[in-house]
Image (cartoon, rainbow, N blue to C red):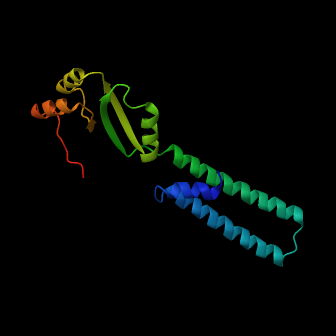
């Protein structure tokens, strides 16, 4: 992946500290290279020294930029948690993983194999779920028992 594609893919989800750091490093590197080019033009320096200085500058900035990028990528903790209670084998793990990666939300996924098992777990106070998938007749029963609260979807 090229740098412009990487920046574009990062910007799609909003401006983040990683993009700000990357932009700052690119601007700083550009200013240094321009300043160095003006210095070379006015001072007589041999090519070996120029190559050594440019290589050193490149290594320093790529190390700093890479370190900042890797540190920020590894330290992104999910901001929110979504507790889901669903039928077993209803949703593949790959979909949950992609959802967590895309939206930076941790998904706690619990399953049940029948309506009766779901009712038993909910009645026993087995969990506080944000989203529960149930059969239509079971939703009515759970509402009457005040086990679940239905929310309007806009």
Left or right of 77 in this view: 10: right
Task: Please state the horizontal and vertical placement of residue 90, each as a whole percent of the image.
Answer: 36, 29
Nearest the viewer among 118 and 105 is 118
Looking at the image, residue 105 lies above or below residue 6: above
Query: Residue most toward the bottom?
Result: 42
Quadrant of the rendered image containing residue 60: bottom right
Task: Please state the horizontal and vertical placement of residue 122, each as a whole percent of the image.
Answer: 20, 27
Task: Please state the horizontal and vertical placement of residue 102, each as a whole percent of the image.
Answer: 45, 46
Looking at the image, residue 76 lies above or below residue 38: above
Quadrant of the rendered image containing residue 145: top left
User: Total marks drawn?
Assistant: 0
- Residue pictured at 31% horizontal, 36% vertical: 83
- Residue pictured at 31% horizontal, 30% vertical: 86
Left or right of 49 in this view: 59: left
Query: Residue most toward the left?
Result: 144
Quadrant of the rendered image containing residue 142: top left
- Residue pictured at 13% horizontal, 35% vertical: 143
- Residue pictured at 59% horizontal, 54% vertical: 6
Task: Please state the horizontal and vertical placement of residue 140, each as a whole percent of the image.
Answer: 14, 33
Nearest the viewer among 62 and 43 is 62
Nearest the viewer among 6 and 52 is 6
Left or right of 2 in this view: 111: left
């Amino acid at each position: 992946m090229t740098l412009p594609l990487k920046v574009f893919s990062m910007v799609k989800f909003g401006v983040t500290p990683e993009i700000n750091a990357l932009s700052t490093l690119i601007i700083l590197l550009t200013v240094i290279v321009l300043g160095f080019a003006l210095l070379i033009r006015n001072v007589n320096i041999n090519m070996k020294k120029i190559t050594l200085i440019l290589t050193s500058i490149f290594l320093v900035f790529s190390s700093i930029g890479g370190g900042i990028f890797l540190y920020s990528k590894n330290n992104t903790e999910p901001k929110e948690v979504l507790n889901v209670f669903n039928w077993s084998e209803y949703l593949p793990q790959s979909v949950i993983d992609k959802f967590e990666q895309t939206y930076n939300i941790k998904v706690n996924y619990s399953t049940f194999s029948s309506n009766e098992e779901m009712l038993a777990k909910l009645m026993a106070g087995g969990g506080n779920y944000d989203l529960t998938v149930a059969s239509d007749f079971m939703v009515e029963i759970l509402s009457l028992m005040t086990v679940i609260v239905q929310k309007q979807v806009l």
